[in-house]
Image: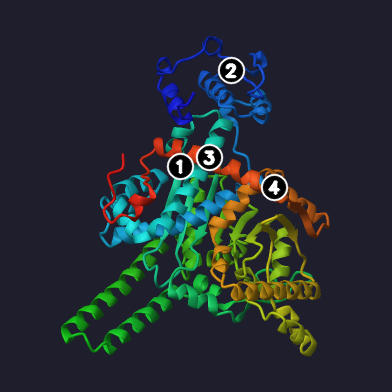
Amino acid sequence: RTEPLAMRTDKMSTGLESEVPRTDEEAQAQETSTPLVSHDFETASEAEPSLSLGSTEAANNLFIVAMMGKKIKNFTDTFKSKKSDQVSPRNDFFREVCSALDASVLIAFYAALRRLAREDKLKQPELILDFPVTVRKVIECISINLHAVIGEMGNERYGVFETFLDEREKRLEEIAVRMGRNYASLEDEAQVGVYHFGDEESDRELVYAIFLDSIRKRVTVVFRGTTTALDLKQDLRAIPKAIENPIKGMKGISANVRVHLGFYEYLFANERKKQEQITEDSIRKVDQDKTLSEVERNQLRERLLQQKTQVKRHLEDWETEFGESIESKYDLIMNQAIAILKENPGFKLYITGHSLGGALATLFSANAALHESPYVQKPVTCISFSSPKVGNISFKKTFERMEEDGLIRKVRVLNGLDLIPKTPSLGVFRVLLYVLCPWNVNNEFSHVGIELKLKGTGFIISYDRHDARWLLLADTWRTIKGFIYLFHLIFFLRITKLLYYHTCSEILVRLRNYYEELQKHNIDDLYGRIKKGETGILSRITISKSDRSQKGKNKDAEIKRRKANFIRNSALPTFTAEQRNSSVPEKIE
């Protein structure tokens, strides 16, 4: 029983059951197609005739899970009434958030690999450049180009990628068990991967990807977080921009809303005008560079003009394919997503991102929820991580009306000590602004959706309404606490912890710590309570220090076991600390 579950199910799916030793009870269970199920591995188990699945492979899979010590009591009731291939994955709060977090991490890693491939630094670049881009292709690409990947990304980023792959494998295994499938081949049989990737000009515009997941029946649009200098510049352009309210005319809804200028222009700036401006700026820099000869300068000008023409040609090709005008990045991404949804009827649209990506996801989802395409099922779901604020109080009121009408669901996840979600903000000066200019209080930036705040001692799920005065006082108090904590970090020379609390890795650690509590909640159930009038804190969990320590030890042991199984069943390379730090790593078996 020390053999990994994937290897055992692989043998069964290929009909090689004889290679795996079995007890008499196992052999008898297989002959009768009745699984030998125990809800508790420590207790004696016996066959239950009522659990006939009608599938030898499903029965064997369930039997293996029982023998591995997993409790499958939650699955048996479903299997009694449904066939194994009709069971869908669970969509509780924890799993929905984690699947979105996976996409937010993978896009940054995939974009780095694709940049190396375009620079001819990788062997077999088609593995990462040709669509669809699957996890297995990425693993194969890393195996072939291990030294180049580690040299470019470093040990720490590579370790983060390994951790998220392991967590993803764990959830895929659970889905396979529920569906009575062989999880080792589940992803190969299903359509799971990246079908569009917008990173051709990653240093000049936003980067996005569109994931298709036929297992969970969803199409996910994910935006990359702050990476380049231009990303940081757009973050700092925190000027309220007035735009027309798409649902103006309703009672209590203003005609205009104000949103973050930098985020808005990243998504909705005119693509043709933007490309012309980029080309003009690049040519101006070439002309000012005195180190270039006249021949080199002319060659660079010609190349820039060719790039401009190529971008325009691509836009025209997209317009011909979609039959619609493409004016902005939003138009392009939305049409690409709809094209995938059209080929997969019944799939739902998810939008996610971390930091800057979370802010772009919020803006994108607010517009996608109002799209009239019959292929965009409502509600649209947006799950953002460590996202800054996007719009003012009027934008928040509009967003709440769309939530009430069932057009959109929004979950915002953050760490309690992360300062980025508190921006942009005037801080304590907002009180003075309210006293001097009370009519401007609605122009202050505010968050939207359900908030999941992860702390070291527990978590809080809350939902705040649009009352401007209450939000003013609450945000001011939070800002004061943030400044106190910032002073504490600076005084004790621990300023680097500010960035640590903003990472996806810390979010994943805290989500794992509160797994049992979070899986008791459901996004739809929470919105049902909100529609009934509940606001403020919807759920609060506090965990003692001893319980957190024990949970951490158990999770670490489980992660090590699963990582060993995952690496054994895939081509993903691993190495010791000495091998990582060595200039010429030893050959990895």
Q: Which mark is first along the chain, 4 or 1? A: 1
Q: Which mark is first along the chain, 1 or 2? A: 2
Q: Distance between the residues labelled 3 and 1?
A: 18 Å
**Which residue is at 56% across, 36% downward?**
175
The amino acid type of the residue labelled 4 equals Ser
Q: Is mark 2 on a helix, strand or loop?
A: loop
Q: How far apart are marks 2 and 4 (CA)?
A: 39 Å
Residue 377 appears in the rendering = no
Q: Is mark 1 on a helix, strand or loop?
A: loop
Q: Which mark is first along the chain, 4 or 3? A: 3
Give yes or no for contact between labels 3 and 1 (Cβ–Cβ under 8 Å): no
Q: How far apart are marks 1 and 4 (CA)?
A: 43 Å
Q: Where is residue 261 in the image (x, y as percent from the top left)?
A: 56, 78
Q: Is mark 3 on a helix, strand or loop?
A: helix
Q: Mark 3 points at which residue?
A: 170
Give yes or no for contact between labels 2 and 4 (Cβ–Cβ under 8 Å): no
The amino acid type of the residue labelled 2 equals Pro
Q: Which of marks 2 and 4 is in front?
A: 4
Q: How crowded is mark 2: few (under 14 residues within 10 Å), some or many (20 or more)?
A: many
The amino acid type of the residue labelled 3 equals Lys
Q: Name the residue under label 2.
A: 35
Q: Which mark is first along the chain, 4 or 2? A: 2
Q: How crowded is mark 1: few (under 14 residues within 10 Å), some or many (20 or more)?
A: some
Q: Name the residue under label 4.
A: 546
Q: How crowded is mark 4: few (under 14 residues within 10 Å), some or many (20 or more)?
A: few
Q: Mark 1 points at which residue?
A: 191
Give yes or no for contact between labels 2 and 3 (Cβ–Cβ under 8 Å): no
